[in-house]
Image: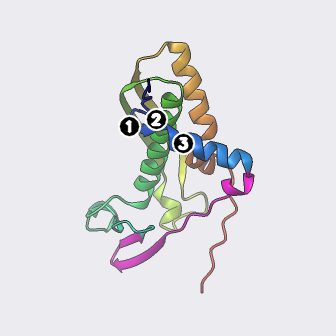
Amino acid sequence: MTIEVDTRLNEVDLESVGSLIAAVADDPKKGQTEWKATVTWKGAFRSEAAIRGFDPVPSDEPAALGGTDTAPNPVEQVLGALGNCLAVGYAANASAAGIKINDLRIDLSGDVDLQAFLGLKEGHAGYGGLAVEVHLDADATEEQLDEIHNKVVNSSPVGHTLSSAVPLAISLA
């Protein structure tokens, strides 16, 4: 008699994730990855990022900032990147724990002082801080959700990138 085991939960392929974890555990060099994007200016404040083989990701500024408001601006994309990264973390960790997610929504916000960006004063031109509120409805106890939440917060690549000083080398070629 053959028993078929479902290796998908929350649409996550648990077998593939497990294989990746095993491969990196066996050979840590496999865990060292590099990611790339190429951004091309499209006129005015519009640009687009080419990432792997996907359709280009557009960027623009709102009309109030001189753009044509055809796409999210870069600081909005940072919020989206963090939220998307956290969503992956919740899906992976809940699925690995055998927990079904019924609904997940992540609300993100942050304040940017435009004075430094506009050259009106010296100082920090980026976000002064970010607020993230996770709405997670899952078939789990509060203790299980807290454990998943802590794992996600402590392992989010984008979260860690934003919360730590990252060496940045920008050169004019």
Q: How many angstroms separate mark 1 from mark 3 (CA)?
A: 12 Å
Among the two numbered marks 2 and 1 on one chain, the one whose residue lies closer to the N terminus: 1
Q: Secondary structure at mark 3?
A: helix
Relative image position of residue 18 (x, y in whole percent): 57, 40
Q: Which residue is at the front of the view, 96 or 152?
A: 96
* Residue 4 part of the magenta segment: no
Relative image position of residue 173 (x, y in whole percent): 60, 87
Which residue is located at x 62 percent, y 74 percent? 170
Q: Which residues are magenta?
A: 27-49
Residue 130 shows up from this direction: no
Q: Is residue 42 left or right of residue 38?
A: left
Q: How is the image coloured?
A: rainbow
**Which kind of residue does numbered mark 2 sit on?**
Ala
| Residue denoted by label 1 | 11
Q: Are marks 2 and 1 in contact (CB under 8 Å)?
A: yes
**Which kind of residue does numbered mark 3 sit on?**
Val
State the quadrant of the N terminus: top left
Among the two numbered marks 2 and 3 on one chain, the one whose residue lies closer to the N terminus: 3
Q: How many angstroms separate mark 2 from mark 3 (CA)?
A: 11 Å
Looking at the rendered image, the disc whose residue lies closer to the viewer, 2 or 1, is 1
Residue 91 disc label: 2
Q: Residues within 10 Å of mark 3 (few under 14, many from 20)?
A: few
Q: Which residue is at the front of the view, 156 or 34?
A: 34
| Residue denoted by label 3 | 17
Q: Secondary structure at mark 1?
A: loop
Relative image position of residue 104 (x, y in whole percent): 38, 31
**Which kind of residue does numbered mark 1 sit on?**
Glu
